[in-house]
Image: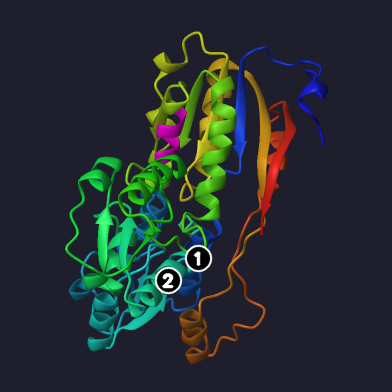
Amino acid sequence: MVTLADLRPPRGYDLGVKIILANPRGFCAGVYMAIDVVDQLLEICPEETICVYHEIVHNRHVVDRFRDRGVLFVEDISEAPDGSIVVYSAHGVSPEIRAQTESRELIAVDATCPLVTKVHAEAIRLARKNYHILLIGHADHQEVIGTRGEVPDAITVVESEEHARSLELSTTNPLAYLTQTTLSTDDAEKIIRVLKERFPGIKDPSSNSICYATTNRQRAVRALAPSTELVLVVGSRNSSNSVRLTEIAENVGTPGYLIDDASEMCGDWFKGIGTVLITAGASAPEDLVRAVITRLIDDFGGHVEQHHIDREDVEFGLPGSLKKVMRKRGVDPTGRRIHVNMGDEIDAWLDDQKIPHASVDLTVGRSG
Ligand code: SF4
């Protein structure tokens, strides 16, 4: 373990750009699970049609790679061929979608992140207790559509601080609030403050519904971006948590660019820049981050410092619906687990690429 003060350039150190790699970044436990569910289905059911309802995770490359392997992505259950397997994405679905799958006798495999399922469960529990729920989030996001679908009459979506200020409610029920899992913690706090001013006594969730992965990736950017000159966020534009990381960089005064991959990097951004922070949204594959590092090192030379703000060791098990499919096809799920990479492979890759690198431990927490 090395501290900032201990960092000394190794022999032959290239005085190019200093690349700070934010840790944690990239895949979260829910994304590992959702992707691995589809991987395992492709392995177990090679002759069957595998559909995914909506994008399995919000990343163009992940979706394209599965499409290339024969997975069908559908935006409506009616598009799924008869007899196919339908995977629900990490963002979750409403009961209506589950009912449509069932009525068509399709085989449902639920890859919803357990932390999203927890928000659904809390919404149902609150509605049963007669609460009206203010769900803070983006109305058109799949996760919010799914959560609202659980108890549509008991939920009003609140999208912004301004919306919270102007909200007119006709209900006389007691109020509670919940949040989408991938919001900016700063924005959510502002909205919650307004709701508490306007509706004193509004009930807090039993636990924070912004998930650990969103919180940690944002905390890392908030801590590291102020001492860098430019932030690159690897992620797709429809990835809520990736967009929020870019906004956080901008909010602390550092220009931030959201890029799907290295091909979107623009040479002009780096003129006169000595320090670049790289992070990645929770749905962005690590190989895309490596391609960004390679391009920077090829173009400008330099070295990598990994700055660790949080250590994560969250893992989810195989969904029950996947185990059921396995058993029906004679595959014993015992001993099978979700493939995760806790980030140890980057050092070996940097060594292999002969890129000078060091680790800086700024850990403030551990999630597990
Ligand atoms: S970002 Fe959070 S809620 Fe979404 S899949 Fe990852 S762990 Fe689950």
Q: Position of residue 339 (x, y in %)?
A: 60, 63
The answer to whether residue 176 shows anywhere in this view is: yes
Q: Secondary structure at mark 2?
A: helix
At x 55% / y 54%, what residue is drawn?
212
Q: Is residue 158 magenta?
A: no
Q: Secondary structure at mark 1?
A: loop
Q: On screen, 26 above or below 294?
A: below
Q: On screen, 238 above or below 28?
A: above
Q: Position of residue 158 (x, y in %)?
A: 27, 52
Residue 122's tag is 2
Figure quadrant of residue 93 = bottom left
Q: Are marks 2 and 1 in contact (CB under 8 Å)?
A: yes
- Between disc 2 and disc 1, whose residue precedes? 2
Give the crowd class for mark 2: few <14, some 14-19, many >=20 residues within 10 Å.
some
Determine the main secondary structure of the stretch shown in magenta: helix
| Ligand 1 closer than 8 Å to label 1 CB | no
At x 32% / y 46%, what residue is drawn?
238
Quarter containing the C terminus: bottom right
At x 23% / y 81%, what residue is drawn?
100
Q: Position of residue 282 (x, y in %)?
A: 49, 49
Q: Is residue 105 left or right of residue 23?
A: left
Q: Which residue is mark 1?
A: 206
| Residue that extends furthest to the top in the rendered view of this protein | 272
Residue 42's tag is none
Instruction: Depth check: give the residue in front, 181 or 171.
Output: 171
Give the crowd class for mark 1: few <14, some 14-19, many >=20 residues within 10 Å.
few
Q: Is residue 333 left or right of residue 106?
A: right
Q: Which stretch is magenta? A: 244-249
The answer to whether residue 73 shows anywhere in this view is: no
CA separation in Å, label 2 and label 1: 8 Å
Q: On screen, 208 above or below 363?
A: below
At x 32% / y 54%, what residue is drawn?
199
